[in-house]
Image (spheres, coloured by chain):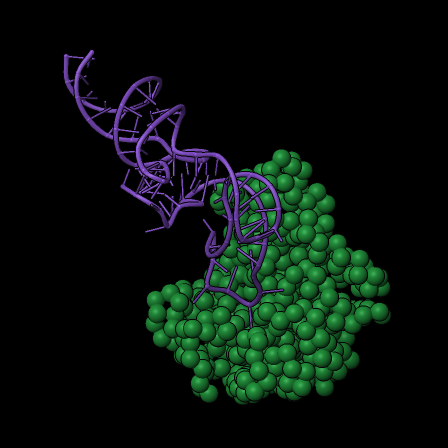
RNA sequence: GGGGAGAUACCAAAGUGGCCAACUGGGGCAGACUGUAAAUCUGUUGUCUGAAGACUUCGUAGGUUCGAAUCCUGCUCUCCCCA
């Protein structure tokens, strides 16, 4: 309703955005309406379910599909922000609630004015809720209805994460997109466990949304909250969970609990099931995915946002993703290859250093090797999704995807 | 010149009669990694073979023994101390 009034008085999208900052939080109805306006779809692909859109945040526009580099501890390991902006050109990065809460703690980040000024990053930040740590630190936590009791992996101290607490921490961090607190169920996991886990996640979601609505942003700009669909590899649960996520009417939705070991085909199938239910006019974020091929296949199934440690972590470990396939730069065959890491890259760093040099650095354990490999991989990922966006806009995404997936998946 | 110690696989280094094709570390080669407890972890590293197995190895030449990297003798070389 409010949106209609604005459009009749001729406000453009960007003016609307500016308006929002001044008066955000005054009226809950208003916030709900603005959330709807945060995502704009420019083009839907005809042969697949792919979409090209733009997600508006307080820290800039995010053209989608997008890949978000993972910067768990408020740093994309080994990469200067300058290179994130130029070489990689990432409009948004991830940070992690659990990790930042433990160290350096929310006090200092609040005093800095949130995670953006704290880390000197003026583009968007999405914070994961710690739900993944419920999964990855399973040996160090205990789940209850109330929340998750963690033992810190740093000093062993005990901490209780509840949905309310996780929202509060993310308010302190000031991320543009906050994630609901969930349990990421392991794989394999039986239907009974998956059901109970999903129901717990849903109850936690209600508490997250409730607390989200009851609290205000601390730094004068709007923060979104994305619910997370769970349900393991069971279609009935996935459907129920997607319906639950859609019902809370947040600005975007996430699909969690995939790429935890199940076959890629199962992941695609679950993504399709979920996306057939999640609202079309909001961004869909497939958490933790994945390989370049996973990403293109999921874009084809209607996913808009991705994150994964693969380009960064695997890069540090010598795996390079290129338009001609995947290479292990440590392998002997690159020892005398003086050609650039990627001659056709958008990134100057990928065009500059040779494979032989990068191999030498990585094998020698030189930190510059990890840096170059990470920057190269992230530049490749970002350039891949930018190209996907372009193909969607041009209407040639389907065939391009088929051909590209084959090429980039190959082991060279 | 005198005295002493030593020589083991690519490097370093353990092993001092059979459980040794030889511990361990490094290096080499390969693999893993999907909302980061990861600049981490795993495998492999004499030759042939898919494997079972076979063959050749512990400075070198002999010897003792059913059996030697391990014991004995000669030789070659290296290091340390004293003059």
- Percent of width and height locating residue A176: 57, 70
* As drawn, A293 above or below A80: below
- Residue A407 appears left or right of B49: right
- Using the image as rendered, state which of residue A217 and residue A293 is in the foreground: A293
- Residue A364 appears left or right of B17: right
* As drawn, A247 above or below B43: below
Quadrant holding the N terminus of chain A: bottom right
- Percent of width and height locating residue B23: 38, 48
In this structure image, what is the colour of chain A? Answer: green
Residue name at image x 62 percent, y 44 percent: A349
Residue name at image x 59 percent, y 59 percent: A310
* As drawn, A158 above or below A395: below
Residue name at image x 44 percent, y 85 percent: A144
- Using the image as rendered, state which of residue A31 and residue A102 is in the foreground: A102
- Using the image as rendered, state which of residue A382 and residue A116 is in the foreground: A382
Q: Quadrant of residue A142?
A: bottom left
Residue A282 seen in the figure: no
Chain depicted in purple: B
Q: Quadrant of residue A221?
A: bottom right
- Residue A193 appears left or right of B73: right
């Amino acid at each position: 309703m409010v949106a209609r009034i604005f459009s009749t008085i001729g406000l453009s999208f960007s003016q609307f955005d500016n308006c929002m900052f001044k008066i955000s939080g005054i009226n809950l109805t208003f916030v709900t309406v603005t959330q709807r306006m945060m995502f704009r779809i420019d083009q839907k692909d005809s042969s697949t379910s792919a979409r090209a859109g733009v997600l508006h945040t307080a820290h800039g526009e995010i053209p989608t599909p997008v890949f978000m580099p993972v910067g768990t501890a408020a740093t994309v390991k080994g990469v200067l922000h300058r290179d994130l902006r130029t070489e990689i050109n990432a409009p948004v990065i991830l940070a992690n609630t659990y990790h930042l809460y433990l160290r350096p703690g929310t006090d200092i980040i609040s005093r800095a004015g949130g995670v953006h000024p704290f880390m000197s990053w003026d583009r968007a930040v999405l914070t994961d809720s710690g739900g993944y740590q419920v999964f990855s630190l399973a040996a160090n936590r205990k789940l209850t209805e109330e929340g998750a009791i963690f033992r810190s992996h740093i000093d062993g101290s005990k901490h209780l994460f509840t949905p309310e607490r996780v929202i509060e921490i993310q308010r302190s961090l000031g991320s543009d997109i906050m994630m609901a607190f969930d349990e990421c169920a392991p794989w394999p996991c039986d239907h009974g466990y998956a059901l109970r886990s999903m129901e717990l996640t849903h109850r936690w979601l209600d508490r997250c949304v409730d607390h989200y609505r009851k609290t205000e942003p601390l730094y004068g700009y709007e923060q979104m909250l994305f619910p997370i669909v769970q349900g393991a590899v069971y279609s009935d649960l996935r459907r129920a969970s997607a319906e639950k996520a859609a019902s809370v009417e947040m600005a975007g939705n996430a699909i969690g609990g995939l790429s935890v070991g199940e076959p890629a085909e199962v992941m695609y199938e679950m993504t399709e099931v979920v996306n057939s239910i999640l609202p079309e006019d909001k961004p869909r974020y497939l958490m933790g995915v994945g390989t370049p091929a996973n990403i293109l296949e999921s874009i084809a199934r209607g996913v808009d946002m991705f994150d994964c440690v693969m380009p960064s972590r695997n890069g540090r470990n010598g795996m390079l993703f290129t338009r001609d396939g995947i290479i292990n730069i440590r392998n002997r065959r690159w020892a005398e290859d003086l050609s650039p890491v990627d001659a056709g890259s958008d990134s100057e760093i990928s065009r500059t250093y040779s494979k032989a040099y990068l191999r030498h650095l990585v094998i020698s354990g030189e930190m510059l090797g990890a840096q170059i490999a990470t920057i190269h991989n992230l530049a490749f990922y970002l350039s891949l999704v930018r190209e996907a966006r372009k193909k969607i806009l041009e209407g040639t995404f389907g065939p391009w995807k088929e051909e590209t997936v084959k090429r980039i998946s190959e082991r060279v």
